[in-house]
Amino acid sequence: MTHFKKVALAYSGGLDTSIIIPWLKENYGCEVVAVAVDVGQAEETSGLAEKAYQTGACDFHLIDAREEFARDYLFPVLKAGAIYEKDYLLGTSTARPLIARKQVEIALATGCDALAHGCTGKGNDQVRFELAYQALAPELGVIAPWREWSIISREDAIDYASSRGIPVPVTKKDPYSRDRNLWHLSHEGGPLEDPSFEPEPSMFKLTADPMAAPETPEKVAITFVAGVPIAVNGEAMSPAALVSKLNEIGGRNGVGRIDIVENRLVGIKSRGVYETPGGTLLVNAIKALESITLDRDSAHEKERIGTRYAELVYFGQWFSPLKEAFDAFVDALSEAVTGTVTLKLYKGNATVIGRTSPNSLYSEALASFNMTGYDARDAAGFIRVFGLPTRGRYRIESRKSLDETLPGDEVTAARLRKAAG
């Protein structure tokens, strides 16, 4: 076992990191610096310092990164149209590189010689944290307790905590593994590991049951400048405040629930239930705005890149040259994505009902059934040119059919000769 003197631990105060502090001290004999990063966990950051010190930390740091998270991490992902496997809005995936960056900064400032995290050996987060470590401070050692200790289940972890008098926010009666930040709340583990199990209504925390949501639809207008959301219902807001406001609006209308089985990077299928109310509103809104501000080819290419961008974020490759190149591409296209989109929210649905932009490419005159300003005769030549490959293929297939025709079938042969020209 490599010897380390001081280790910076990515600390959340949850089950895993609560027992990692004493475990590190018992097994490595090192000092532990607990680093908590506030990316919108709400009340979960309360009392963390006291808890960290009580469990053996020599130092504790709580960093408020909510505005940075929204501005520099969430909004670039939003602009890129990055959605993993068409459903997952990347809440946890986007937070990890920021948390890892802040952890590294504290580690270097406090003289740590190693970094530690509480990610399991089966999940994606271990990759996300450690790729960030490699990009930002490859000289520091890495300790991943879940790949070393004898604990093999959350029940074992609960027992370990109980035996040492460590209070944890999880019990065997409430076994869900949750991750909350400004963008979403995820639910995994426990009964959800059975993909046929219907989530219990009490599990949800951010969104109202759609069936119990208000009977009256609610409208919300979101304004963007160069692809970045800046205002809700005409009120300018900071990035974090804007996301929080939309979480509140979407949440009370039951918007933003998804139940998916996703493909982890390590090859395991994982079932997760996510609540992303504000993010869902923003994704729907920016798509609608792009529909009138981006030309066809740019929109199609951006959609293709969005899929790859989502993979980079999900796989933990935030600090990569390819992502930087994609960001430059997206920023260039997003210069035109300015305007306001209005959504109508009703019992879990968020429907676009209006979009306006000073950069709109939409022409009512051209889109209208009125033929004024458009010469329909131009379409004939365009269609013939566009159809050249189709006609060429048809001629080849016709000749093949002609060669395969029986000699006695004169009628069929004559028809094919005529069709072949």
Image (cartoon, rainbow, N blue to C red):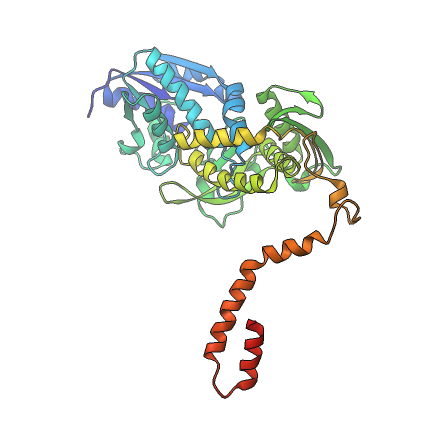
Place residue 169 in its image quadrant: top left
Q: Residue 102 at what x, y percent from top left? A: 41, 18
Q: Tell me what residue is drawn at x 54 percent, y 86 percent.
A: 410
Whether residue 411 is situated above or below residue 308 in the rendered picture: below
Residue 227 shown left or right of residue 145 in the figure: right
Give the side of residue 187 with respect to residue 9, left or right: right
Name the quadrant of the N terminus: top left
State the count of labels: 0
**Residue drawn at the location 49% of the way across and 75% of the way down:** 401
Residue 58 in view (yes/no)? no
Q: Identify the residue at image location x=54%, y=67%.
A: 394
Q: Pick the residue in front: 248 or 178.
A: 248
Location of residue 178 with respect to 389 vertically, above or below: above
Residue that protrudes farthest toward the bottom in the picture: 408
| 10 or 17, nearer to the observer | 10
**In-front residue for pair 193/38:** 38
Give the x, y percent position of residue 177: 45, 34
Q: Is residue 33 left or right of residue 362?
A: left
Where is residue 376 drawn, in percent x and y? 73, 52
Looking at the image, which residue sits at the far front?
Answer: 421
In the displayed structure, 398 sits above or below 239; it is: below
Q: Can you say whether 342 is above or below 42 in the image? A: below
The location of residue 265, given as percent across then percent down, is 38, 40
Foreground residue among 299 and 138: 299
Q: Is residue 339 visible?
A: yes
Which quarter of the image is occupied by the C terminus?
Answer: bottom right
